Amino acid sequence: MADDKKMPDANRDPITGAPGAHPVGVGAGAAGGGIAGAAAGAVVGGPAGAVVGAAVGAVAGGLAGKGTAEAVNPTVEDAYWRDNYKTRPYISGEAYDVYQPAYRHGWESRERYEGKDFDAVEPDLKRDWEKTPHAKNLTWEKAKEATRDAWHRIERALPGDADGDGI
């Protein structure tokens, strides 16, 4: 008899197959850390310091980015919203599948815009949403609240208030 329970996604590395790979989170963290490290290193040690600072910052940033990415398990998020979407005030009888892409947009965007306030990046989120095929079935005005909900759920799961908005 087949087991109907879904196992959480192990986020396997596409090359090695090792669990816990988060290339987007690691890449975003490494890029940000490398830039910050280069700037700090240049101030302290000139051009050579910038090179060393960029390398150290990229490693530290990559590890921080992986940690943030590991806090976002798409399988868990999808299951949470599938079970809870009907309790949200903006839902008026639509099926979960209508809102699922907006929730995904929220949890993926929170990771992409690490440390930024939802309202500050909302124009970017809207632009990105309107480029998707999902915008035909769900306008940004309706998708925005689901996106915001998923964004803040991820933010609450992380230590501190990264974007400083009190939520």
Image (cartoon, grey):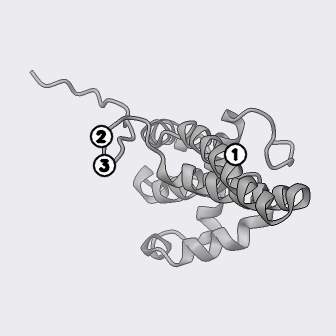
Instruction: Determine whether the residue tagged by mark 2 lies in a helix, strand or loop.
Output: loop
Q: Which mark is residue 6?
A: none
The answer to whether residue 146 is seen in the rendering is no
Q: Is residue 69 left or right of residue 32?
A: left
Q: Closer to the camera: disc 1 or disc 3? A: 3
| Residue 124 occupies quadrant | bottom right
Q: Is residue 129 left or right of residue 126?
A: left
What x and y, as percent, mark residue 44? 90, 55
Q: Residue at x 56, y 43 (%)?
A: 69
Q: Is residue 51 left or right of residue 83?
A: right
Q: Residues under labels 1 and 3: Cα distance? A: 32 Å
| Residue that protrudes farthest toward the right in the picture | 43
**Amino acid residing under circle 1:** His
**Residue named by callout 3:** 15
Q: Residues under labels 2 and 1: Cα distance? A: 31 Å
**Residue named by callout 1:** 152
| Relative depth, front residue between 113 and 83 | 113
What x and y, as percent, mark residue 164? 86, 47
**Residue named by callout 2:** 17
| Residue 82 occupies quadrant | top left
What x and y, as percent, mark residue 128? 58, 73
